Image: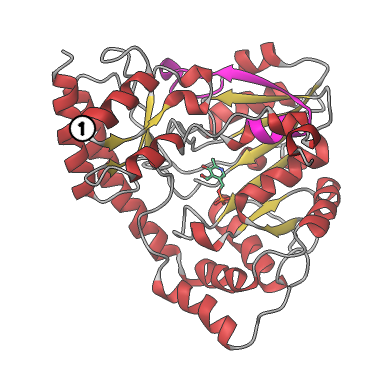
């Protein structure tokens, strides 16, 4: 008889289920539950972007594209990176259009990590990073970032974590889940540590458009860093396009050739209608992106003010659309808080432990929800914490 468990790759069998989904399955069974959990815009893709995707289908553009994406899209991405972040990437030799930022992360990890290698990942971090590295057999070296440092990686921490086996550093700012952002000077201090090494940076800049009062800086724009950095980004967060599955990576030519090889075999090409929609987003979508940023900013300020008033120890997020309060004054840890909040007040949020052990005293609340929904959830949260004061 067939037994898949005897055949499965033990690394895959050993992966923990993502801690994000667990409470949403429960919340779905509670009729008046409010979820502030999911990390995706509540906005629908702007009409003109949607139309571009639909019209491409009507015009018969239903085939594969070139492996690395439509050349027109790669040219738009190149122009966008130049215009917004002062970075120069060759459309044909340095840009790959991928299935979300998710695929971009996967192909870079796979191209460089093998068993025994080490990858440094500042924590708390996006759930996919440790899983992807583990699937390559690599060792994840987490660095705990803390509120006192605004959840930023410090050069001292980085220096202490580097060993002869370190191959990659994953940088992810603006951060999911903390909302931390690194300034140019802070990135310069990190770059100064890296320049003497052969370590490559994967810079996940998927939230680059969502910073509040800061200009986003890419570490790749600093002297000597472009040649050792791969930028991962995409359309999901900036243009409210999560379901289109459209991302990209920008890599120096020396790196591009390896990741393009994997992409060509596993994906062939990113979804064609999504590529046409992405061209439209880059040509005419900046105003939509600016509008959504302003809306997130209002929600961010509201949430932060209210949570502080209720007595939470809460870092004011500077980017992305998450807030990451410490809940240890109200519960044993984040999981305990999340379970009881869902049970007593029917509000679903994510325990910080989903983003690594260093997040365990926290919860992540997403503010990619309407202000009305956030307001209702806050009333319930206040009732919940008042019982624990
Ligand atoms: C930090 C970070 N990187 C990458 C992704 C992947 O996004 P997508 O595959 O939709 O582009 C996400 C999604 O939540 C994220 O939060």
Image position of 156 with respect to 359: above or below:
above
Residue under the image location 35 percent in, 55 percent down: 42
As for residue 27 lying within the magenta part, the answer is: no
Q: Which residues are magenta?
A: 130-153
Residue under the image location 75 percent in, 43 percent down: 108
Image position of 357 with respect to 233: above or below:
above
Quarter of the image for residue 160 reads top right
Is 45 placed left or right of 94 in the picture? left
In the rendering, at what x and y percent does residue 249 appear? 68, 52
Furthest toward the front, the residue is: 1
Secondary structure under tag 1 reads helix
> What is the count of numbered marks?
1
373 or 24: which is nearer to us? 24
Quarter of the image for residue 162 reads top right
Image position of 235 with respect to 232: above or below:
below
Q: Is residue 68 visible?
A: yes
Residue carrying label 1: 345
Is 106 placed left or right of 34 in the picture? right
Residue under the image location 51 percent in, 32 percent down: 182
| Picture quarter with the N terminus | top right
Residue under the image location 43 percent in, 42 percent down: 320
369 or 230: which is nearer to us? 369
Furthest toward the bottom, the residue is: 59
Image position of 334 with respect to 343: above or below:
above
């Amino acid at each position: 008889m067939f037994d898949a468990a005897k055949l499965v790759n033990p690394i895959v069998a050993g992966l923990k289920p993502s801690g994000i989904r667990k409470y949403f399955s429960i919340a779905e069974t509670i009729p008046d539950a409010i979820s502030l959990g999911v990390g995706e815009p509540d906005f629908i893709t702007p009409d003109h972007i949607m139309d571009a995707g639909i019209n491409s289908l009507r015009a018969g553009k239903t085939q594969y594209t070139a492996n690395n994406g439509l050349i027109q899209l790669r040219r738009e991405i190149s122009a966008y990176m130049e215009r917004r972040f002062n970075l120069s990437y060759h459309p044909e030799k340095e840009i790959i259009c991928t299935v979300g930022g998710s695929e971009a992360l996967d192909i870079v990890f796979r191209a460089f990590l093998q068993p025994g290698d080490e990858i440094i990942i500042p924590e708390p971090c996006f759930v996919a990073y440790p899983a992807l590295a583990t699937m390559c057999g690599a060792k994840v070296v987490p660095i705990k970032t803390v509120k006192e440092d605004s959840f930023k990686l410090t050069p001292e921490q980085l220096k202490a974590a580097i060993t002869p086996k370190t191959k990659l550093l994953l940088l992810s700012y603006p951060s999911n889940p903390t909302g931390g952002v690194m300034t140019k000077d802070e990135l310069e201090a990190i770059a100064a540590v890296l320049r003497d090494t052969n370590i490559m940076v994967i810079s996940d800049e998927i939230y680059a458009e969502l910073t509040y009062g800061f200009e986003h800086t890419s570490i790749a724009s600093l002297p000597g860093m472009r040649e050792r950095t791969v930028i991962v980004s995409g359309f999901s967060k900036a243009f409210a396009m999560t379901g289109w599955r459209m991302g990209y990576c920008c890599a120096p030519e020396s790196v591009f050739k390896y990741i393009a090889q994997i992409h060509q075999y596993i994906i062939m090409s990113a979804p064609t209608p999504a590529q046409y929609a992405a061209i439209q987003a880059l040509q005419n979508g900046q105003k939509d992106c600016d509008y959504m940023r302003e809306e997130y900013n209002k929600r961010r300020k509201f949430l932060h003010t209210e949570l502080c008033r209720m007595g939470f120890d809460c870092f004011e997020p500077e980017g992305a659309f998450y807030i990451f309060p410490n809940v240890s004054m109200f519960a044993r840890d984040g999981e305990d808080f999340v379970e009881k909040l869902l049970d007593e007040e029917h509000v679903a949020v994510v325990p910080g432990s989903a983003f690594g052990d260093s997040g365990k005293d926290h919860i992540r609340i997403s503010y990619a929800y309407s202000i009305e929904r956030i307001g209702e959830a806050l009333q319930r949260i206040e009732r919940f914490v008042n019982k624990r004061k």
